[in-house]
Amino acid sequence: MEKTILIVDDEAGYRDLLSLELGGHGFRVLTACDGAAAAEIAASSRVDLVITDMKMPRLDGLDVLRAVKSLRPEVPVIVMTGYAVEDRAEAAIREACAFLRKPFDITELKSAVLAVL
């Protein structure tokens, strides 16, 4: 069965790049432009992995991680950020299955995805 990845980022360029890369490797990709939209998608669709940015409007990456885990604790979440690590990011790092600092090499992302799926 095809695995579904939800990509959450308020930057369209990252969403598009990750969608193309992961979709090209046989994954079904869903996208959300903010944390609130991601929580709605996670509640209504089957997802096997969530990749979320940390800093976003409405709900940040830690909120997304916790919303997903409250719905489906078995779903792994990868958190990525381009900002300095702060308290909320440190909590996300502890709770996520992987943490990527932007900009990252696409092979680093693929390795993280394959490690959890």
Image: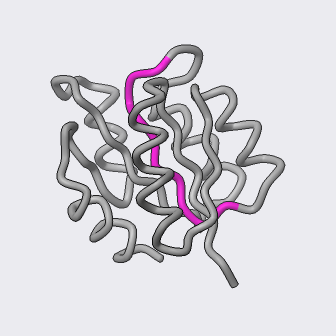
As for residue 53 lying within the magenta part, the answer is yes
The segment highlighted magenta reads 47-56
Could you tell whether 20 is left or right of 48 in the image?
A: left
Q: Residue 99: horizontal and vertical position, in percent?
A: 27, 50
Instruction: Give the residue drawn at x 39%, y 23%.
Output: 55
Residue occupying image coordinates x 78% and y 47%: 43
Asked whether, in this view, residue 85 is left or right of residue 78, the answer is: left
Q: Is residue 63 above or below residue 94?
A: above
Residue 15 part of the magenta segment: no
- Picture coordinates of residue 86 (x, y %)? 22, 23
Q: Is residue 35 left or right of residue 41?
A: left
For this orientation, the residue located farthest to the top is: 57
Percent of width and height locating residue 101:
20, 41
Q: Nearer the viewer, residue 96 or 7?
A: 7
| Closest to the observer, 19 or 98 | 19
Q: Residue at x 40, y 35 (%)?
A: 53
